Image (spheres, rainbow, N blue to C red):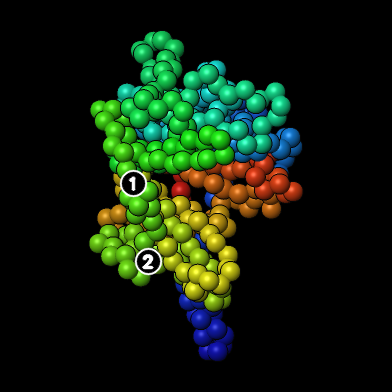
Amino acid sequence: MRICRQIIIIFLILFLSACGNGINQLHGTWFFLKNGKFVTIENIRSVEKIQPVAWQHQERISDIALFHNKPVFLINSQGVVIRTAESGHPEFTYEYNDIFKNRTATLLLPGENSIFCHLYYDKAFRNDEQTTSPSQPLCFVKITFPENDSAVFEPFQSVFHRRNGSWEAVAAYAFEANSAVLELKRSENDYTQFGYTLFDLKTENEEEKTKEWFTESFQLNEYETTLLKDKSLAKLLEKSIEERTKNSRPVILHFAVRDQMTRADQRIRYATVNTSVQVEFEKILIVRSADQYTALLPDGKLFVINRSEVSHFQRYILPALPDSCEYTSFAIAEGILYILWEETDKQDFYKIRGSGFLQVSSLPDSH
């Protein structure tokens, strides 16, 4: 009898310990982007197959950000979608405009009273009927929302772009609040030039930058040499590295620590082996919101840590995806998670089939 009691006690200790370090399974509502509208689906495995198209031209969710604490989805070739419902069944406001057609949308930068969308014309992988480029090159589209009226779409050029119309802003990166770094390209007679500028969207001031400045500004900082005064972020990185390097698995991790308000990234790199060795490369997005850090790992795990209480660390796992799908990004609004997913064509990795998002209404406390 005594031995049985001891066995039961040991079992209870192990069980409680496992529960304390366990991972909560998350559930939510699946949304699928179909013909420009979000529709609910039972689960991601029931989504209908869409003809694969190069990512630059497919109707897909290119980005997600917050505007007045509401999620905004950037839809390639269409415009933006804003979630407008406060509770109950989600409702969406679709703000589409022809200015997005035949252009690739890459980045959302919400301002105080407007949303900026980066657009450019990409000649690659276009069909014959799509070879005619838009008459006006663009950097951004500025979308404003007059009270009780429809959205206003306004081409928004940088100073450099207005003076140099032959250049195309092929990439834009959030830098600080209300500012972006533009990567510009000009191709003439088999000769290609690149340029870089720092553009303030609020004041419209712009500074030309060197390639060295651009490279230094967006370089990956080595984890071992990154001095993190933020103890919560340091612990989250430590836990993420521990999780992704289990069983001595060789891997290179690239962390993008994104401020949810400014959208700017802090980039950190961790490698288990020398870079000359060919190993698996993984990108991990960490979103910094008002009260927490949230990390999305490649296998669908979510690690969450409170910014003011380092001991409040939680682990979750999202529903498993088919091999052809992956979670790509996410945002948090009023405690609700919006996690983007995308289906890639198995034969041509650069082609996208479908996209959508998973809405998780609340995170259970694992403590």
Disc 1 marks a residue whose amino acid type is Thr
Residue 91 numbered tag: none
Would you name the residue on which mark 2 appears?
223
Q: Position of residue 253 (x, y in %)?
A: 48, 63
Q: Is residue 41 visible?
A: no
Residue 45 versus residue 239 in the image, above or below: above
For the point 40% across and 40% down, the residue is 195
Mark 2 vs mark 1, CA separation in Å: 26 Å
Describe the element under mark 2 as helix, strand or loop: helix
Residue 364 versus residue 87 in the image, above or below: below
Would you name the residue on which mark 1 appears?
210
Quadrant of the rendering where the C terminus is positioned: bottom left
* Residue lying at the far top of the rendered structure: 149
Disc 2 marks a residue whose amino acid type is Tyr
Callout 1: 10 Å neighbours few (<14), some, many (20+)? Answer: few
Q: Is residue 102 visible?
A: yes
138 sits to left or right of 233: right
For the point 72% across and 49% down, the residue is 346
Judging depth in this view, the residue of 193 and 51 nearest the camera is: 193
2 vs 1, front mark: 1
Q: Position of residue 124 (x, y in %)?
A: 62, 36
Q: Position of residue 125 (x, y in %)?
A: 66, 36
Residue 290 versus residue 188 in the image, above or below: below
For the point 28% across and 27% down, the residue is 204
Q: Position of residue 93 (x, y in %)?
A: 50, 21
> Counting residues from the N terminus, which is met first, the one under dot 2 or under dot 1?
1
Describe the element under mark 1 as helix, strand or loop: loop
Callout 2: 10 Å neighbours few (<14), some, many (20+)? Answer: some
Labels 2 and 1 touching (C-beta < 8 A): no
160 sits to left or right of 92: left
For the point 71% across and 27% down, the residue is 128
